[in-house]
Amino acid sequence: MAEIRETRVVRGLLGPLLLLVVVLVAGGLLEAASDLPREDWFVRAFLVIGLLAMVGYVMLVHLPQRRTARDLRELKEQYTRQCGAIESTLTEMQQGDLVNALTPVDALREDMRRAVQAATRALAALIQQIQSSSVDVSTAAGTVQKVSSELASASSQQAAAVVEITATMEELARTAGQIATNAANQANLAARSEKAGDAGAASVASAVSGVDAVREHMDAVAARADTLGSRSREIYRILDLITEIAQETHILALNAAIEASAAGEHGERFSVVAEEVRRLAERSRESVDSVRVHLDEFAGSIRGVVVATEEGSKAAGQVLEQSRSAQEAITQQREALAETAQAAREISLATQEQRTASDQVVLTLKEVSGVIQRIADGLVRYTGAAERLDQLALSIQLLTQSFRIESQHSLKHQLYGWTQRLSDYAGNLEAVEGVLQEILQESPYLELIYLVDLSGSMIAFVVNRELVGERELPGSLAVGQAYADRPWFQAVARDQRSAVTPIYDSLMTGDPCFTIAVAMHNNDGEMVGTLGVDVNVRNWTRI
Amino acid sequence: MVRQVVRGLSCYPVPGSQPYLLGLAQFAGEPLAVLDLHALIAGSLPGAAHRATVILGRGDEGAKRVLGLAVDEAVAVTSLACEECDQESGSLVAASTEVDGDPVKVLDPSVLFSDEWNPGVGGSDG
């Protein structure tokens, strides 16, 4: 444009400049030929100059002007075409169709076409990046929401656990105080027991001495009893001797009686004496037997005394040994009691320190409980923020889905591709339903795909049973039902392009979903219907 | 007749002799045959304590024909009138009577010196 404007200025100034040159040249010639007759000179000069002016004008003004006018027309036509192409491109871009936006750019100049293509592709790449990022953000937000929710729950549990630990530590502190008191009492008791042990040790030592004296007495008694036993044996020997003498006397008395009997009347008096002697011997023997019986009892008693004294001495020895063991045990017990008293005092001190430490732990735990509670509150807010971030990411996703770009993640682009597949089976309803079924299997994130004619009446639809399950379908979902009042249908019918609805809760699954609808055209470019899909957001973002 | 009472004599058994013959003992420098009163009266009684030996002799032959009678004990010497006894002629136990209320069997020592006397085993009780 600047070049054209410059050309037009140059050409506009060229005519006046030529006239000025002619006038200046004519003036110069008139001045140089002042000696010639004025009329001839003037006519010839005029003719020559006029001719020169005419030739100059034609050569310098007219012909360039004609070329300039032709160039100007061509430039205008080119400008008009480029403006139309740019308008078409911008219109497509306005409608969000960045695929068709590249179609009109062939009419542009090379550098402009490249610039527009580069700008469109950059915009598509940006949209795709935003779309991908929004999915990532949604996924991350969902993860953050889940994690923060779990952390909030865990923090609440942790706070409850800290409260329980605090209560336990308080109980532990109280218990430690009781232990300290009991340990102090035990220390006092052990000290008293130690004193009692000293008295007991002294008593046992006295008992040991007494038992030792008793044993010595018992040994002396045993020695006396042994002496008595020896004396008894001597008495037995004497009794045996007396018995023998009595027997001899008895026999002598018998023999004397025999001799007295043999002497007849002369021996009668002697026989009386012999009988008396025999009776005396008999009584002596009976007395000896009686003494022997008593001596047996006495000897038995002596043996009993000996046995008793031996057993007593033995028992005294055992008692002495046991008393010494008891004395040693009491000594050890006294030492153990001293150690116990020391240990009890140490336990008392340690438990007092433990109680102090427990109190500090309780204070710390209360602070920790407050911190955890604040963390739980923060995590709850964090969960809310993550939810809002998820919603924002979905909103961005929807915004990006309002654009059509050459990407498998562009639902509009997918829908335009599906309309191409469906256009091949126009009029064959069963084939159309088969194609819809194939599309549903290829795209598991779709809850529903349907085809509506120009009047808004449902032609065909297919439900994704893997998502919907065996739930009962809403009554509005049926062939022949009118969808003319739906915003997406009205938007598509108005612009004959595409429409994206905000997110709403699906009547079939209850999950958040949104609807994308595109216009279907025949080979002549006339709109013949609307293809719509309901996209399950959760499965879409998961994909 | 009863010549003497002595303490129980130590006897030396005679091989192949009658059971009532305890054996031979030394008495007054001479061998003396000692008979067991228990064996004579009630048969053999092993283990009986013979604390006295009664020396019997035939009155007409002095001290040449003597026998020893081993008894448990010699209690007393007494004289009995023949009319107080229940006579049993020809046997060792010649009569039976009572002394101080106790039953007493009276032996006839002459039977022991008789050549025809054979007490047999388990003779009359006494």
Image (cartoon, grey):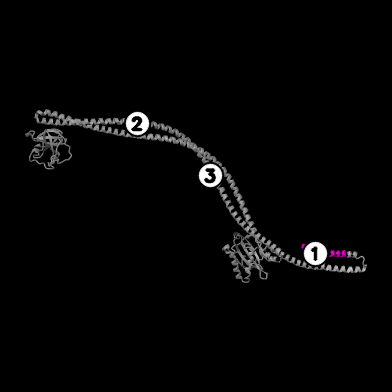
Residue A522, percent from left and from top: 66, 70
Identify the residue at image location x=82%, y=64%.
Answer: A12
Range of the magenta residues? A1-25
Can residue A289 be seen at all in this image of the molecule?
yes
Are the residues at dot 1 and dot 3 in contact (C-beta closer than 8 Å)?
A: no
> Does B120 sit above or below residue A402?
above
> Does A156 sit above or below residue A25?
above
Would you name the residue on which mark 1 appears? A8
Would you name the residue on which mark 3 appears? A168
Q: Is residue A7 magenta?
A: yes
Q: Which one is nearer the viewer's eye here, A102 or A49?
A: A49
Give the Cα separation between the discs numbered 1 and 3. 99 Å
Chain holding disc 1: A
Q: In the drawing, what numbered circle is on residue B84?
A: none
Left or right position of A521 against A322 = right
Pointer 3 local density, CA inside 10 Å: few below 14, some 14–19, many at least 20: some
Identify the residue at image location x=35%, y=35%.
Answer: A318
Split into 4 quadrants, where in the image is the N terminus of chain A? Answer: bottom right
| First in residue order: circle 2 vs circle 3 | 3
Pointer 2 local density, CA inside 10 Å: few below 14, some 14–19, many at least 20: some
| First in residue order: circle 1 vs circle 2 | 1
Q: Which of label 1 and label 2 is nearer to you?
A: 1
> SS of the residue at dot 2?
helix
Q: Quadrant of residue A234?
A: top left
Left or right position of A495 against A42 = left
Would you name the residue on which mark 2 appears? A214
